[in-house]
Structure formats: structure tokens, C-alpha cells
Image (spheres, rainbow, N blue to C red):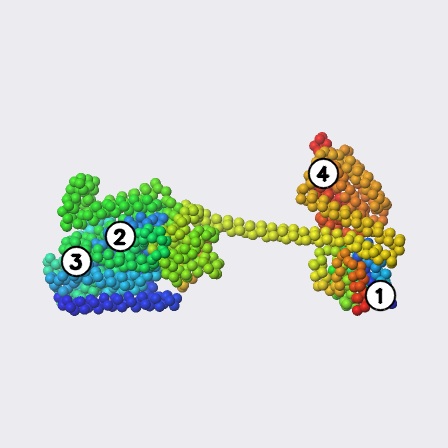
Amino acid sequence: MTRRVLIVEDEKNIVESLTFLLKRAGFAIDAVMDGTAALQRIGDDPPDVVILDVNLPGTDGFDVLRAVRSAPATRDLPVVMLTARMQQQDRRMAEDIGATEFIAKPFSNAHVVDTVKRLIDR
Amino acid sequence: MLAPNILLFVCLSYVALLFLVAFVADRQAEARANRGHRIGWLQSPLVYTLSISIYCTAWTFYGAVGSAARSGLEFVTIYLGPTLVFIGWWWLLRKLVRIGRVHRITSIADLISSRFGKSPTLAVIVTLIAITATTPYIALQLQSVTLSYQVITGSDGLNEAATAFWAAAGMALFTILFGTRNVTANERHHGVVAAIALEALVKLFALIAVGLFAIYGFSEGLGDMFSRVSPELLRPDEVFGTRWVVLTFLAATAIICLPRQFQVTVVENVDEKHLATASWLFPLYLFLISIFVLPIAVAGLAHLPAGSNPDMFVLTLPLAADQGALATFVFIGGFSSATSMVIVAAIALSTMISNHIVMPVALRVTRSHHYTSGDVRRLLLNSRRASIAAILALGFVYYRLTDGSDGLASIGLIAFAGIAQVLPGVVGGVMWRGATRYGALSGLAAGFVLWAYMLLLPSFRAEFAGIEQIVTSGAFGIALLKPQAFLSVSIGDPLVHALFWSLSANTTLFVIVSLLTRPNPLERLQGALFVDVFRTRPGDQPQILHPTAPAEDLFVLAQRILGAEPARLLFEEIARGQGITRGLPVADHTVVARLERELGGSVGAASAHAMVAQITGGGTVSLTDLMEIADETAEILEYSQQLTQKSAELESTALQLREANAKLKTLSDQKDEFLSQVSHELRTPMTSIRSFSEILLDADSVSDDQAQRFLTIINQECLRLTALLDEILDLSVLERGEVALALEPVDAEAALDRALDSVSGMAVRGDVRIRIGARAARSDVLADFGRLTQVFLNILNNSVKYNTHPEPEITVTSRWQGDQYVVSIGDNGPGIPAEDSETVFSKFGRGSRRQETGSSGLGLPISREILRRFDGEVVLVATDRPGAQFEVRLPLLRAAVE
Amino acid sequence: MNADDRDLRRRKVTDAAIFLPLLGTFLLMPPLIRVFASNGEVAGIPVVIVYLFAIWLVLIIVAWRLAGPLRGYMQAERPRTDDPDDPPHQDSPLSNKPPGIGQ
């Protein structure tokens, strides 16, 4: 069956590039632009991997991750965090909360695709 | 009569006992001090009181009865004066003892010198007065020992000179052995004090024993005894006159000012509270000593052969009744009175001589080598030993010179009158801040000269014909200068006459010169510290660590004088006080002042000051600083106010620091936040650019349409990036105030029109409807036309970009409000929550609003910054309509308003 | 005894200490002492002697009675000394004690 990746990102150009990349790699893509929608989507039907931007309007990426990790059903859901802000701080924060992977923007396409593949194969 | 051999044996045994007591006491004190204990009985108020009783010398032991036999009750005054001083201890003694302890005063000369700016001259003068007044007194003691020895052994052929010589030599030896063990005044002479306390008991009991013997051995009790006395003995009419008052006053002065009394009362005081006990116990001692004087005198007059020397009644009365043992006891009592006085006087004088005469000379001599040669301690001790020997030698010589005359008999009171010259300086010094060094100097000098001329000189009239000449016809034959009828004023009693003139001149000059002269800073400081000793402590000085001297040099100096170990302990303590755990303390004013005080305890204030000044280089500046604190009457108040103020200042400084710190932290956080935001804003478009360009590089998998689209995105993002960089630069330049905006009168309405045109033409969101409401007329404001247009454009763009309404609409109106030009730009979008009304103006502060259109988030901060330059502002106003409404306000030019 | 009473007592005691030598001087100096310089006797002893020594003794006794409380008051204002047995000095120069009398 086709593995599903949920992209949570408020920059539509980045959503577009990620969608293109991951579709080409054979995944089914779902995309939302804010944290509230993301939590709703994950709760309804957990995807195989979530790509989560930190800087979201309203509920930010960290809040989303915290909520995901606190729910038993999604405690082990692979989450790849993306951030464009001060790298060290965000990386530490993401690790503390329990991000599976952490990728800084601007990212290498291959790195993102490889990471998602690796997490799904695991 | 007693066999000389037996007497000699008893006498020597007694002396051996004294040596033993002194030795044991010293050892015990040392051992206990080493173990950090109090020194028990040696430091009891009883021993303290008994040591004060050296006031009762052989002169009183033998002479009081003689005086009573000749002049009735007059002898009582010698004890009444001290009684009044001691029961009135709360007035003066308490203060002297406190000053002595706090300032480590070593002698009466040191007290006066220290009070008047550590003046060496004053110290020398007081020392000279003390020597002059004490030497005859010591001679008197030698005479009484010799005379009593002569009387008790009944040997007229005895070699008087030899007896006096050996007595003097023995006392010198004792004094040197036990009086010069330490240099420091606060390492007290425990051995000596113990020995003289024992002697005090011996002389008291001896006199009481004779008194009881006189009353009950010769009559049926007091009543019976007095019934046989002619009323003339008491001479009530003559006795209670001026002389009664003057003698009481003189005795009161002596108990304060005599060097030996000052030594035992102030210098040897180990605990101020002992004074409370002495305040009644010492008067009681005097009371007991004097209560038996009259009976002895009465019995002597009644039962001894006519022509007997009344001064020896105490001894001859038991001898006449063949009471050998009692006579021996009495002799030992008299011997005790003489020796204790001589020993303490020699210690006090030797301290003065070594501190105030030898040390200053040594200082001058060694000035160039700065103490590199010679141990100051050894110099001090040796000079004291030499001084003791010299003082006793002087006493002996004086005794030999006046041998056989009656001159000595009156010498006690003459000495009292001499030392009384110190009184104005002492009392004025500790009670009156205004007293100055020159006042004290001139008063002392005048008083001393007049005393020497009117009292001391005539006491030699029998020995020297020239003096007799002066006494009868005045110096140079000028009758007005007669020593006993100065200026032809006739006051019958020479003592009252001399005291009247000398003390009047002394006090008057002291006061007048003090009023006319200006004290130097050190004098004023010392004056304040002495007068207000109960309110200040010498440590009360500004706590600024200010090295004023090399600490190493001070340490070396302290080692030389205090000894290595005490110096090390002292400096460690000081360093600990400064919070320094290792090494030497910072030698600031406080440390220098403290060290001066500690050294002063060994060498006197003046010498200590001179020594330390050699190292600190005078320290005039520091003293001036200190004076700010110790100045004038409001000193304490000022000090406390300063402290309060200082602590308030400190508190406010701390608060300011905290605030500044918080601000810095906020700034730093803001800067971090800003950098983080810039990073985010730059990386976001770069992410798209990189990602799409990587996709395009992998050309195979991309269709032409897709490629076209991706290239468009890349292009958009590049433009966005450039715009962002421009804005960041623009804002930072604006914020740093580096762009000079050309301010000129411009029509704000025209700028608004230009911006509206631009927005409509941009067609970013073609469906946005722009409604133009009421508009103001031409509105001249002081601004830069381009920048003002930019402001309007930013706000309009903002309203367009964030408007998510399906039928977006922007309403623009403008009006005059007072002397302001106001533009309102409202939209029908989601609005801005109240909590974000400020955030929207901060950098990248889009609040919780996000949109997909490229916006740097710097538009509003830039607009606000620009408007600030025009004295205007942009605010978000709350309305009851949905959506956000911004208002731009600018001051209208006056011309426009009118 | 509350603080006010202690304060009052303290003032009275120090006032007495100040007054005592003045009283003694007044009683023992002329002209007052001349009043007793008559030829009267008390138990065979001339009255002036009895007067003189009695006053003297009274002064001593009063001084003795005062010394106890005064010693206590000294405690409160003792300076720092090098004596290890001394308790550390508590009050600062700013503690605004009422200034003692006779300072």
C-alpha cells in the first residue's frame, strides 16, 4: 500500500516543492497550513510520516509535536521537523520534545526524501 | 628600738614576697593569655581598685598624721578630692578610661598629645612637667623610707645616703624586671599590679592596726580620747576656708592627672566596668585610711614627748609602747606606700620618656634608613629601662641635694600643683571640640612657668641664697614679680597664690588661644573622636578601599614594634575584615588609622603617627577626607545621613543595575529574536529557491510546464528575498538615524493619492475594492514626499495582503483633527486581536496572522520609524467594525492650520 | 518592667550619678561645712568630725548603690576590644541611642 506523508507547512511554495518531491518518490501526500488542522488530520487518520515546520501561525510546530507525543496512539509516529530559525536552539528544543528527525531549511531535496524513506522502512 | 639586722631581714623577706607575687602573677597571666583565658583574680575590680590606692604614698601614710597634728582636719581634703572625682566617675573618669582603651593611650602625655593632633611638642612638655613634678616626690619617698628606718632602728649614725641609695636601687631593679617586660600598653603589667595590690592591703591594715592601737591602747575609746583634746586642734575657723577648697580641688586634680594615677586608672584598666566598682570602693579605701589619722595624731600629741616629729607618730607610737611587731608592720606599711608609688611612677614616666623623647629622636636619626637597622622594640625596652634607672637616680640626687631640709615636707602639694597644669588640657580636650593644640600649648607653658616660679623655686629658698633674694624682693628686684605676691596681689597662702595665678593664666590662655587658632585636620579629627568617644569608634571612617601606603612597609613596621607574631595576627585580622583571605590587606585610611592606634599603644600616638607618616608620606589628603566625616557638631548626624544616603544610593544603583540588566537582557533577547526572525525570513524563500532549483537540475523528471512554473516561483522568491534585504537595510539605517531625511513642507494628501494609485495599479489582488471616503483638503506637513508615500503604501499593502475576506475591501479617509492631519485606512479582514496591537509594529511582528503572500513583516516597523522622523505616528485603533483600522497622524504646519 | 520604665529608671540613675559629686561638693565645702564647725559633740566626738565622716560614708554608700545599674548601662555602650571574651559589638553608630549624660 502507499505510504502517506503529511506535510505541515505554511509557505505554499515549500509545500509545493515537497509535494512534488515526495509524490515522485512514491508517497501519498497530504498537506495542511497550520497546527490546528495538522492535529485534526493526525487524530483522524495518522499518516506514516509527518513533516512539520516549526514556524506555524497559531499553534506552532513544537506545540503540535508535544500534542502528538502526548497521545498514546501517535507516541511513536515519525516526525521530521523543519525550521528556518536559529538552528541550535530549535534543534535542542525539537530533541527535547521528541522529534524523530530535524532538518534545517534550506534543505537538500535528496536528504528530505532519504529521511522520509528511511523512517518509513524502519 | 629594733635591731637593724632583724628589720633588714623582715624587709628583705617582704621584698622577696613582692618579687614572688609579681613573678607568679606575670607567669599566670602569660599562661592564661596563651590559652585565651581571662586572667582571673588579676583582672578583678578589687585588684584594680587596690592598684589605684598608690595614691596613698608614704607622704600620706606618715604625713597625714603629721598634717593632722599641725593643721587639724585639713588632711582630709587630700582624700575628699579623689572621693568626689570617683563618685563622680560618670562625668570624667569613665570618658578617660574609654578614650584610653579605644585610642590605646599610654600615658597622660600621650592623651594630651593624641587629642591635640598627635603633637610631639605637647607630649614633650607634659613629660617634662611630669618629670619635674614627680622627681621631688620620689625623693620624698626615699626620705620617708630612710627616716622611718632611722626611727625604727634608733640609729642616728646610720649612713642615710647608703640606705636611700639601696632603696632606690632595689626599686629600680624591681621596676625594670616587672615593668618593662612588654612594650605594649595593653599587655599590662600584671606582676606589678599584683604586687602593688598586695602593698595596698599591707599599708591599709598597718594604718588601721596603729589606729586601733592608738584608740584602745591609750584611752577608753573615741569619746574618751577626744574629750582630752583641746578644740584648737581641729581649728574649724581656719580650716574651712579657701585653702580647704583649693586643697580639695588640687587633690581631685591629682587623682586624674598624676602620671602614676593615670597609669593605674586608665592605662592599666582591663575592663571599663571595674571603674564602677572602684567608684565606691576606692573612696571607701580612702575613708578607712583617713578615719584613723586623727586618733593617731591625738594619741601622739598626748602621749609622746613634746617635740616629737608628728610625721613619724605612726611609727613612734607603737615604739613608745614597746610594740616591736606592730612597729615593724607599720614600717612595712610605710615601705609599701613608698615603693608602690615609686614603681608605678617610674613605669609611667619611663613610658613617657621613651615614647615622647627617645623615640622621636631615634626617628629623626634613623629617618634616612627607614628602620632597616635596629629593632624598635629593643630600643623601646632599653630606653625604658634606662629611663627608670635615670628617674630613680634623679630622685636620689634630689634627695641628697635637699637633705636635711624641711623643703621636702611641702613637696607633695607642690607636685600636685605642678601636675594640675595638665588639667585644662585634659578636661578641655575631652569635653570641648574647639580646643586646639596652640591653646593647650600656650596654657600649659604659661601655667608651668608660673608654677615653677611661684612654687617650685621658693621651695629651694633655704638652699640657695639667690632664690631667697628673688622671693623677698622679686626677680631682678622688681617687687611686682615677687613669686609669692605677684603683681602685688596679696594672697596669704603661697600655694593658693601660685595655683590661682598659674591655673588662671593656663585656663585663660587655653580658651582664648583655642578660640583664635584654627586646628589642623588631624586635630579636628582627634578632637571629634575624643569628645564623642561614646558615639564614635575610631573605625568609623569611610569604608573606601584606597591604598594609601605599601602594605608591606606597614607590615614590616608593625613587626618591628609589636613583634612578629602579634603583627601577623593583626594584619590577618584586618585582611579578614576586608574579606581578603590570603596575603596583606589593602592599606587604606582605615588600616593606616588602625595601625597608628595599635602602634600608639606601644610608642604613643605622636611617635606612631610620625612612623606611619614616614611610610604613607604624611597622609594629609586622607586626613582631609576623614575630616569630612568627623567635622563639626553635626558629625554623627552627617555620618549617619551619609550612610543612609549611601545605602539608599546603593539600593537605587542596584535597582538601576537590575533594570539595566533586564533591559540588556530584553535587548539581547530582542536581538536574538530579530536574528532568528531574519534567519527565518531569509531561509524561507531560499528553501523554495534551493528546492526548486534542485528539482530543475534533475531535468529528466520535470515537464516543460512544470519547469516554467518552478522557474516563476524561483523568480518570485528571489524578488521577495531582495525586497526583504532592502527592507532590513532600510530599517537598520533608519533606526541608527544614519539617513538624513530631507524634511520640507509637502502635501500629505498628494502622497496619499500617489500611494493609492500605486496600490490599485499593482493588481496583486485585483479583486480588492478600495473605497475612498471623505478626504481632507490640501494638508501641508513637514516630511519627505517619497518616504511619506512609502508609509501609506506599506499600510495599504498590509491591509491588502492580510485581508482574507471573500470580498476584500479597504476604506481610506483623511481629516484634520485639531492641528493634526489624520489618515484612516481600514479593512474588512480578520482584524488584529487587541493583544497584538503593539506587536504588529515590531519587526517581523505579524502577530499570529500569517498569509501566503510574501511579506517581510517589516513594513509597519519601517513606517513607524519614518513617521517618527516627521513627528508623527501610526497606530492601530480599536473600532466596533470588523477588520483592522490603522491611523497615520502627522502634525499640520501652522500655516496650513491658519 | 517595660521599656519606658527601664528608660526612665536609667535616666534617673545616670542623673543621680551626675548629681552625686555636686551634692558631695556642696555638703563638704564651705560655707555649709562651717555650720557644723561648732563646739558641739556627738558621743564625745566633735560634731564636725561626725558630720564629715558621716557624709563621706553616705556618699560612698550611694555611689555603691548606683554602681550596679551603671555597670549594666556601660555594657550597652562598650567599644570593640581585643578581648576574646567580649561579645561582639552589636549596635552600630547609627542605632541612635539616647546620648548618655556627661559625655
Callouts 2 and 3 close, C-beta under 8 Å = no
Q: Mark 2 packing: few (<14 Cα in 10 Å), some, or many (20+)?
A: many
- Residue depicted at 73% across the width and 50% down the height: B844
Q: Which kind of residue does numbered mark 1 sit on?
A: Arg
C27 displayed left or right of B844: left
State the CA–CA distance, disc 4 to disc 2. Answer: 92 Å
- In the rendered image, which residue does mark 3 sit on? B311
Q: Chain of mark 3?
A: B
Name the element at disc 3.
helix
Q: Where's residue B822, x and y in %?
A: 74, 39
Q: Amino acid at mark 3?
A: Asp
- For the residues bearing labels 4 and 2, Cβ distance under 8 angstroms: no
Q: Does the residue at mark 3 contact the one at mark 4 (Cβ under 8 Å)?
A: no
Q: Dot 1 corresponds to which residue? A: A3
Q: Earlier in the sequence, mark 4 or mark 2?
A: 2
- Residue at x 28% of width, y 63% of height: B178
Q: Position of residue A107 (x, y in %)?
A: 77, 58
The residue singled out by tag 2 in the image is: B130
- Judge the density around disc 3: few (<14), some (14-19), many (≥20) Cα neighbours within 10 Å: many
* Element assignment for label 4: strand
